[in-house]
């Protein structure tokens, strides 16, 4: 019995008869089978038959995505003879299979044609490659390119389909390789070839390659279209400047194209990709600028445009702008979806109350919160140290969405020192068969370390190894900090071989913890000896120079001390120095002075992660750096000139709302804070009854030496003693001061002493600035001898 006869017998047992009519097939232009539906399994009478025709490709589709060769041959047997006479009929079927994304069936059809000695040409091969391309089966597509039929008659369509297969399959490097091989195969790449390759490049975010392909198009005298620009911009990834440049080129190309009426639909993806590039780079101003530019370019932004722009507002706390963009959707006839609210939630940062309000607004607008929504809200609670709110959100999420590993990571991070709660959620995570990742373990280790459970933290490091989860640079920091807190120098030293086993180079944070612990337990000689041993693990940076200038106080091996003026942030001041430094000079910040503070600022001449940077940061973290400040405080007397004192109060630093809607750092004395020590000495005393607010009040000029480096340490410690700094309207007197002629916060870093990269002492000093000198001169007449 033939295969076709067998299939006919099988169909008959189900009450279905298959017959063939090659005459009809010839008239229709391709092979066709008839399916005759019968009311029963008995033989069909002419009056009972209901005849309908089904195309071959539809019959093949019914076989499933992976039919056997026998199944395909049964369907094709009635039509194969006509394909031998006219190969174009096979092309129609193969093209239809490509549109249906059935590469396996198309491949079997090709094999059946070869078995029946039907002609197989380049059009047939191209159709099968197209089927593979639509499914991302790049391996099948590339193997079909080697067929001799294509070598004899190569077509751009086949190569373009193979490039598309590589793009869909995420093999962007292979797509670029195929484009370069086209000319070797005597095929000239066209605009579709380049567009497909550029679309593949966005998977690799290789903006340099994308720009290179555009230059090659120009060399080939191919005019890029809107699809080209959109794909090239998407390939820029986070290279926002290149993306904006391409948008400008796209605008210029619009002016020279006749098809301006399709501008909106074709240019919008390019703009959206550029906004996303700005968002990934933290350039929220440029992202918002592009969004508004769309309107002036006769483009109507869509939800993708707004979502990317809203997401960019998470940088620098631009949450008010994010809310404004959400409310602006209605002006262009758009309604926020779940993805829109998810972008807004990401912009909430540590504003957990706003995150909760955002979830409520979602429900009011019929947008269903998903796992991403709840996870972002939980993360906001974690940043705001609101663990109870995070727990409540997690319970709500379990009723409407599936928790993910990211959800559990954010939740465990909220536990802070409550390590028992963290363990409960970790076990719950395992019971749901959610695989923990390195972030999960880092969060749990952090909870153990902060909860003074150092042994549990170390045991979890062993668990990570057995579970084949590789630690990262963050993993070992909480145990190191716990060891430093407990003075466990042997444990902190045991961390180093664990890091090296995983090929992790210890950074300045670990080095600082270890060195600080050794200094406290074994002395400074041991601490510096350990630090010198770490130098061999830090790659030396190239030679860098910085030119002399009025702000340069002193230069040494790997370091330069500069005079920072008041009323400028450390970041902005260093950035101005970088712009004036010779090309190739790297400057890294290892210590900061507050915006209103002046004085000595040490800068490392070396890049992040260099020997120089790690060397100096380790000294700061270990408390091996000596700094002296001059300040003026007011309040009850601290004693006679020469009296020394010490403040030993832990400080807790958190982010709070600033005056312009952004987040700023604030510190307070708290038992939950980190250890902080400040030494002071009274240098001069002043008293003027006509200005002081209480008879016992004085103005005192102090020399202050912070032994730790907490945020706003001197200001908070002196305020906690009831002697706030003159001019400190954050921690001190917010209204009237005893020294109304002081123009700013009276705090100046006078000197800094450390050890340079060659092991020599480095000392730099800066005299009090002229504005503060004038204050002391005005106070001189009220000096107390």
Image (cartoon, rainbow, N blue to C red):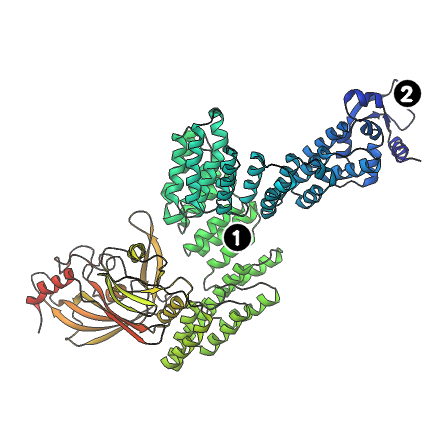
Q: Which of 68 and 365 lies nearest the eye of the viewer?
A: 68
Spot occupied by residue 193 in the image (x, y as percentages of width and height): 58, 37
Q: Which of 183 and 476 lies nearest the eye of the viewer?
A: 183
Q: How many marks?
A: 2
From the viewer's perspective, is residue 431 above or below residue 108?
below
From the viewer's perspective, is residue 581 above or below residue 194?
below
Q: Does the rendering let one see residue 689?
A: yes
The residue labelled by disc 1 is 407
To which quarter of the image does residue 256 belong? top left
Q: Does the rendering let one see residue 599?
A: no
Q: Is residue 439 left or right of residue 282?
A: right
Which quadrant: the C terminus?
Answer: bottom left
Spot occupied by residue 7 in the image (x, y as percentages of width and height): 87, 34
The residue labelled by disc 2 is 45
To which quarter of the image does residue 589 belong? bottom left
Q: Indicate the secondary structure of the residue bearing disc 2.
A: loop
Q: Which of 679 and 238 lies nearest the eye of the viewer?
A: 238
Q: Which of 407 and 399 lies nearest the eye of the viewer?
A: 407
Real-space Cα separation, disc 2 to disc 1, in angstroms: 65 Å
Q: Is residue 89 left or right of residue 306?
A: right
Residues packed near mark 2 inside 10 Å, few (<14), some (14 to 19) or many (20 plus):
few
Residue at point 37%, 41% (across, down): 321
Spot occupied by residue 414 in the image (x, y as percentages of width and height): 46, 58
Q: Indicate the secondary structure of the residue bearing disc 1.
A: helix
| Upstream in sequence: badge 2 or badge 1 | 2
Which quadrant: the N terminus?
Answer: top right
Spot occupied by residue 390 in the image (x, y as percentages of width and height): 47, 53
To which quarter of the image does residue 545 belong? bottom left
From the viewer's perspective, is residue 362 above or below residue 731?
above
């Amino acid at each position: 019995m033939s295969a076709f006869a067998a299939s006919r017998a099988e169909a008959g047992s189900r009450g279905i008869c298959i017959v063939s009519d090659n005459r009809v097939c010839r008239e229709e232009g391709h092979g066709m089978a008839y399916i005759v539906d019968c009311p029963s399994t008995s033989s069909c009478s002419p009056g009972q038959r209901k005849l309908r025709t089904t195309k071959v490709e539809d019959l093949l589709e019914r076989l499933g995505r992976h039919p056997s060769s026998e199944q395909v041959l049964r369907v094709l047997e009635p039509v194969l003879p006509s394909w031998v006479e006219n190969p174009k009929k096979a092309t129609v079927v193969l093209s239809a299979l490509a549109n249906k994304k059935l590469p396996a069936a198309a491949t079997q059809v090709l094999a059946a044609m070869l078995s029946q000695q039907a002609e197989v040409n380049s059009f047939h091969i191209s159709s099968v490659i197209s089927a593979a391309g639509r499914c991302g089966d790049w391996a099948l597509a590339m193997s079909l390119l080697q067929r001799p039929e294509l070598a004899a008659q190569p077509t751009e369509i086949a190569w373009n389909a193979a490039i598309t297969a590589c793009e869909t399959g995420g093999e962007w490097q292979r797509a670029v390789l195929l484009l370069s091989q086209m000319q070797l195969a005597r095929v000239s790449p066209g605009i579709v070839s380049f567009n497909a390759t550029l679309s593949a490049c966005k998977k690799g975010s290789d903006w340099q390659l994308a720009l290179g392909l555009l230059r090659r198009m120009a060399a080939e005298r191919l005019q890029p279209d809107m699809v080209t620009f959109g794909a090239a911009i998407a390939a820029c990834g986070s290279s926002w400047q290149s993306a904006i440049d391409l948008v400008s080129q796209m605008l210029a190309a619009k002016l020279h194209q006749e098809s301006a009426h399709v501008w909106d639909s074709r240019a919008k993806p390019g703009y959206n990709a550029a906004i996303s590039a700005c968002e990934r780079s933290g350039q929220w101003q440029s992202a918002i600028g592009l969004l508004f530019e769309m309107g002036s370019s006769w483009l109507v932004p869509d939800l993708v445009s707004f979502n990317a722009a809203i997401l960019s507002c998470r940088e620098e706390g631009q949450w008010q702008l994010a809310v404004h963009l959400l409310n602006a959707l209605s002006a262009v006839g758009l309604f926020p979806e779940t993805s829109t609210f998810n972008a807004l939630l990401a912009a909430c940062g540590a504003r957990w109350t706003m995150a909760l309000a955002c979830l409520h607004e979602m429900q009011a607008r019929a947008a269903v919160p998903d796992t991403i929504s709840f996870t972002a809200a939980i993360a906001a609670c974690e940043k705001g140290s609101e663990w109870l709110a995070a727990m409540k959100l997690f319970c709500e999420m379990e009723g409407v969405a599936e928790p993910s590993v990211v959800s559990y990571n954010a939740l465990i991070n909220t536990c802070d020192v409550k390590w028992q709660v963290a363990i409960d959620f970790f076990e719950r995570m395992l019971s749901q068969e959610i695989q923990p990742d390195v972030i999960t373990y880092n969060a749990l280790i952090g909870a153990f370390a902060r909860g003074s459970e150092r042994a549990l933290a170390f045991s979890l490091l062993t668990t990570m190894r057995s579970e084949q989860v590789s630690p990262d640079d963050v993993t070992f920091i909480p145990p190191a900090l716990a060891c430093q807190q407990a003075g466990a120098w042997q444990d902190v030293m045991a961390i180093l071989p664990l890091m090296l086993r995983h090929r992790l180079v210890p950074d300045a944070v670990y080095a600082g913890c270890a060195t600080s612990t050794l200094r406290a337990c074994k002395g400074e000689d041991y601490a510096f000896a350990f630090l010198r041993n770490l130098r061999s693990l830090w790659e030396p940076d190239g030679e860098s120079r910085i030119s002399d200038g009025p702000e340069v106080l002193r230069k040494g091996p790997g370091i330069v001390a500069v005079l920072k003026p008041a009323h400028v942030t450390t970041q902005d001041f260093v950035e101005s120095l970088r712009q004036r430094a010779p090309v190739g000079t790297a400057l890294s910040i290892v210590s900061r002075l507050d915006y209103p503070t002046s004085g000595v600022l040490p800068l490392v001449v070396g890049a992040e992660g260099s020997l120089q940077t790690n060397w100096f940061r380790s000294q700061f973290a270990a408390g091996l750096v000596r700094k002296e400040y001059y300040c003026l405080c007011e309040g009850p007397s601290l004693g006679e000139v020469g009296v020394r004192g010490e403040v030993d109060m832990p400080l807790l630093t958190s982010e709070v709302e600033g005056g312009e809607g952004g987040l700023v750092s604030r510190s307070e004395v708290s038992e939950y804070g980190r250890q902080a020590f400040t030494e002071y000495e009274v240098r001069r005393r002043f008293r003027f009854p006509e200005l002081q607010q209480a008879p016992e009040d004085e103005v005192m000029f102090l020399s202050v030496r912070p032994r730790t480096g907490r945020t706003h340490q001197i200001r908070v410690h002196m305020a906690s003693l009831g002697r706030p700094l003159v001019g400190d309207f954050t921690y001190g007197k917010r209204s009237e001061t005893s020294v109304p002629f002081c123009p700013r916060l009276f705090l100046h870093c006078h000197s800094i002493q450390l050890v340079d990269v060659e092991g020599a002492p480095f000392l730099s000093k800066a005299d009090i600035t002229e504005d503060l000198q004038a204050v002391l001169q005005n106070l001189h007449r009220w000096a107390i001898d």
